[in-house]
Image (cartoon, rainbow, N blue to C red):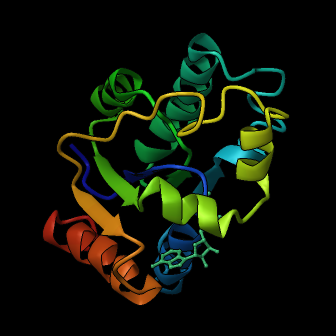
Amino acid sequence: MNKNGVTLWFTGLSGAGKTTISHVVAEVLKSQNRNVEVLDGDIVRLNLTKGLGFSKEDRDENIRRIGFVAQLLTRNGVIVVVSAISPYREIREEVRGKIGNFVEVFVNAPLEVCEDRDVKGLYAKARSGEIKQFTGISDPYEPPVNPEVECRTDLETLEESVAKVMNKLEVLGYLS
Ligand code: ADP
């Protein structure tokens, strides 16, 4: 298999740090003249998967569509940076199987830390009941069993998290 393309899949709770880490990783890769495309869950839901909700069925469909685009890009040598809560293990594994060159990054911080950060004010709304089916509060999150990388964003700096991801890409031969 062509080792140039790869999908870097960032999964984790809202506020765990997926967007923050993935954007820095994307910038580093671009500075190394790699073709990079970012698929951010929040943005994808405004176009590619517009209209989908947050039931398990709709969440799985959201991930399946992101996975399909990631697959097309990956096989053409692009480094695809996906940042999506993607709470269900089975669909992540399905996408992994289809794409092949797949590096799962578990962006992990305890729920209390994510809630305390409340970057977008969503946890407060989830607690008050204004938002239903909110991952971690009123909807499940199934952590990866064997992620290629785990970033503990409550314990490490952004730079350390980015370095872990870059190092894994190097070790797996995607940067050569
Ligand atoms: P997500 O995309 O997972 O919802 P965001 O990246 O939007 O999360 O928000 C994560 C928040 O956590 C940001 O405000 C970021 O500055 C903060 N943060 C603190 N430490 C880290 C770290 N080590 N890695 C990434 N983000 C961190």
Q: Position of residue 17 (x, y in %)?
A: 53, 66
Left or right position of 116 against 112:
right
Quarter of the picture holding the N terminus: top left
When asked about the image quadrant of residue 141, the answer is top left
* Residue ID at (62%, 50%): 39
Residue 125 x %, y %: 80, 44
Q: Position of residue 154 (x, y in %)?
A: 41, 74
What residue appears at the point 60 percent right and 52 percent down from the top-left corner?
A: 14
In this rendering, the answer to whether 40 lies above or below 155 is above
Q: Report the label total.
A: 0
Q: Is residue 34 left or right of residue 119?
A: left
- Closer to us: 81 or 41: 41
In terms of image quadrants, where is residue 23?
A: bottom right
Q: Position of residue 173 (x, y in %)?
A: 18, 66
State the residue at coordinates (54%, 29%): 63
Image quadrant containing the C terminus:
bottom left
Foreground residue among 122 and 41: 122
The residue nearer to you, when weighing 174 against 148, is 148
**Residue 48 to residue 170: above or below:** above
Q: Residue shown at 82%/27% (left/top)?
A: 50
